[in-house]
Image (cartoon, coloured by chain):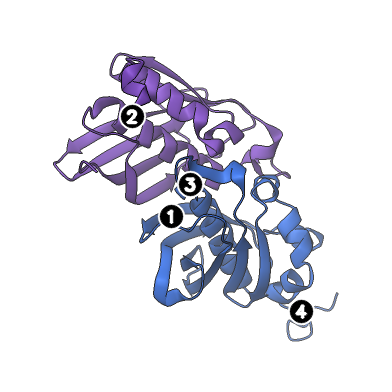
Chain colours: A purple, B blue
Amino acid sequence: MEEEDMKLTRADEVRAFIARTPLAQEMGLRCEVMGDEMTMIMPFQDKLIGNFMIKAIHGGAIGAFLELTSQAQVFLVTEHLARPPRPINLTIDYLRQGHAKDLYARAEITKMGRRMCSVRAEAWQDEREKPVTTLMAHFMVAGD
Amino acid sequence: MSDDPASAPEPWELMQENIEMISGGIPWGRRMAFRFTRIEKGHAWGLQPWKERLVGDPDTGVIHGGVLTAFLDNLSGTAASSALSKPRFVATLDLRIDYMRPAEKGRDIIGEAECYHTTRNICFTRAWAYHESRDKVIATAAGAFAINKPRPAESIARMG
């Protein structure tokens, strides 16, 4: 594979995944990788609004943001995966309104199994301690 | 408007009448090219076209799961507010999505949602996304929505 020829690190591959995934680009996502940790950033854009009367970010856009963050985090730390993992299911808790400003997210693997893994992720704006939305998801991690 | 509840149109009737305005009133929904196709009391149907910019896997061209999340969230929220006998906004409390099979590249996705129970404060919904029929479903969703405090009646046309 050409990725291997170019000796990309997994962090490079995660950045490349964000750069070449049309939906991630459409949402304007950026990721900052620090070793095995990663923060995803979704800069505010008008098109992300779900309710223009209160200028709130669309819940579905936040859900997609957390799903992409989780996918990228699993990919970052699971060396045998040739490509970002496929989701099995997910549950999104909408805790607070997403205001018209940048959104940040981090994901954490709660259990890595042979075939599946469990992930938790949260998105926040001003204060990490006051998450806007949290996500719990399962991904397939069996080698393909 | 009359005070007699029997003569006033139900929220779902106004929503069905203003269905195009509801579809166009959500910026992220517009960006996804999503639209509602039919609204009845406690039910909503919609269409999510395939778009290059919504792809989640550039190697296969399959739309990202996050698009389905937004699609089913929109449909479920609309099914929830259409179930109520007074015009109310609803806010997603939680949403669970199960991915059954990948959507196919280049094909429209059909979605439908129903609100199967309401209490004074909460609407419970389920929803399906598929290409042809519910027998071959792409994703399902189960949601709970909080019913917000009353809003002015004239804002009903902008509900969604």
The Cα atoms of the two marked residues, 1 and 3, are separated by 17 Å
Chain letter of the residue beneath label 2 in the structure image = A
Viewer-nearest of discs 4 and 1: 1
Marks 3 and 4: in contact by CB < 8 Å? Answer: no
Identify residue for label 2.
Answer: A73
Q: Are marks 2 and 3 in contact (CB under 8 Å)?
A: no
* Above-or-below relation of A124 to B61: above
Q: Above or below — where is A66 with respect to A77? A: below
Quadrant position of the C terminus of chain B in the picture = bottom right
**CA–CA distance between discs 2 and 3?**
16 Å
Please state if B154 lies on the left or on the right of B65 as rendered.
Answer: right
Q: Mark 4 points at which residue?
A: B9
1 vs 2, front mark? 2
Residue A73 horizontal/vertical position (percent)? 33, 29
Q: Name the residue under label 1.
A: B95
The residue tagged with tag 4: helix, strand or loop? loop
Q: What residue type is labelled 2?
A: Gln
Give coordinates of residue B62: x percent, y percent: 48, 50
- Evaluate whether label 2 is on the same chain as label 3: no
For the residue pair B57 and A4, the one nearer the viewer reads as A4
Instruction: Characterize the local packing of mark 2: few (<14), some (14-19) or many (20 or more) Cα atoms within 10 angstroms.
Output: many
Q: Gap between marks 4 and 3, in whole Å?
A: 38 Å
Chain that bears disc 4: B
Residue type of the residue flagged with mark 4: Pro
Amino acid of disc 1: Leu
> Do tag 4 and tag 2 residues touch (Cβ < 8 Å)?
no
- Pointer 3 residue: B64
Q: Earlier in the sequence, mark 1 or mark 3?
A: 3
Describe the element under mark 3 as helix, strand or loop.
loop
**Mark 4 vs mark 3: in front:** 3
- Mark 4 or mark 1, earlier in chain: 4
